Image (cartoon, rainbow, N blue to C red):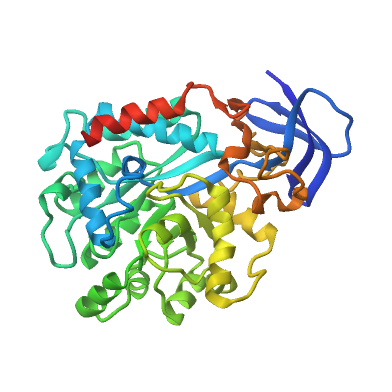
Amino acid sequence: MAETYWAAHALLPSGIASDVAFNVENGVFTAVQPRVGRCGTVLPGVVLPGFANGHSHAFHRALRGRTHADGGTFWTWRERMYAVAARLDPESYLALARATYAEMALAGITAVGEFHYVHHAPGGRPYADPYAMDHALRQAAAEAGIRLTLLDTCYLTGGIDQPLGEPQLRFSDGDVDAWAERVEHGPADGVAVHSVRAVPRHALKTVAAAAAGRPLHVHLSEQPAENDACLAAYGLTPTALLAAEGVLGPATTAVHATHLTSGDIAALGSSGTGACFCPTTERDLADGIGPARALHDAGVPLSLGSDQHAVIDLLEEARALELHERLDTNERGRFTPPQLYAALTAHAALGRPDAGTLAVGAPADLVAVRADTPRTAGAAPEQILFAATSADVDTVIVDGDVVVTEGWHRLGSVGLLLADAIAAVTA
């Protein structure tokens, strides 16, 4: 069925254009024409390409508002996270992920990369269906109306040369060959190395081979303690270790990439590896400010993620890419708006380089951001990114399907869905 939409302003590959008509058929744009009189369904405000959430742990959404006021460190936060993971089963994970993905859709996110490592039942016992948790995530994304890139994550140790703790047993297949065997027959769209802490050096090549050209993501240098442990064990930084074992490359995305040396930055750039920054998580967990501009200058493609979902607002993540640089350097204009929009819509990191653009032949994803709210009123269309929040998203279309209308998700009250799902895993 063909549909026509019209917007007073839209971000096309050439920049902001006026009076733009979009024809959509079979889930793709069949025509995108500026300077056209009003026609079809009129969309409010400024229309942007669909946002790409490059890094998600859906179940972490249950921690929002529960871990911020008691001090502690990343490592104490991790223990709280393990407690939630221990309560998950396929049914509760479906409910929590569905509500979390619906919240993402409300925020203009049309695709998500799920860094998935809760594979088995507590104690590490496989479910009768070894892919039960994968299927729960797949169903959750379908019902919430966003595209899912499911990244099956290898997780084998509790730290370098350390055994798994009890909560971590359900994340592991025991050894890398068992992990690879399960992945080979499973529904994943790509794979992930949890970190150099959780995947021993001898296993890294196997994970890289299992990717087979598909997306490969890895937590990289999120904490100085990770760097110190890696240097002590291998005499290499985490980046150098991944490079030595063939993990880096154009299909690979390094998540966080916070504490890097100049050599690390050069290695990521020369290999074509991407970097996914999660500024609101890195801020919340006191991880630090990563070298985003230096990575960009080295040729590293940048993407964005909401990670632990302390905030689900990719407009804020994109702004923070620039604003964190300003704090770190005392300079403004570290990134141009087009560069920030490129990171906001970096679907290539999720294995879909055809998405993230309002152009003929691309998946028909679009986000209409209102320009008449108390936050956005008076903003120039080309700078709406610096004024809007997720609350200003009015309409979201994914693969031609309308998922959000007038700020309302097709599933109904996402707040109620979240409250019920979170109560089930935090009681």
Q: Nearer the viewer, residue 372 or 57?
A: 372
Check the image and name the residue furthest to the top. 1
* Looking at the image, residue 241 lies above or below residue 427: below
Q: Position of residue 264 (x, y in %)?
A: 42, 76
Q: Position of residue 363 (x, y in %)?
A: 62, 36
For the image, the number of numbered tags is 0
Q: Where, by quadrant of the figure, is residue 136 drawn?
A: top left
Q: Nearer the viewer, residue 31 or 260?
A: 260
Residue 86 as seen in the image, left or right of residue 325:
left
In what quadrant of the picture does the N terminus appear?
Answer: top right
Q: Nearer the viewer, residue 349 or 245?
A: 349
Q: Position of residue 183 (x, y in %)?
A: 29, 43
Residue under the image location 34 percent in, 58 percent down: 208
Residue under the image location 30 percent in, 56 percent down: 194
Residue 220 as seen in the image, left or right of residue 174:
right
Q: Position of residue 256 (x, y in %)?
A: 42, 62
Residue 397 as seen in the image, left or right of residue 41:
left
* Looking at the image, residue 40 lies above or below residue 127: above
Can residue 365 be seen here? The reply is no
Residue under the image location 58 percent in, 70 percent down: 326
Residue under the image location 38 percent in, 31 percent down: 418
Residue 420 as seen in the image, left or right of residue 369:
left
* Looking at the image, residue 6 lies above or below residue 284: above
In what quadrant of the picture does the C terminus appear?
Answer: top left
Can residue 21 be seen here? The reply is yes
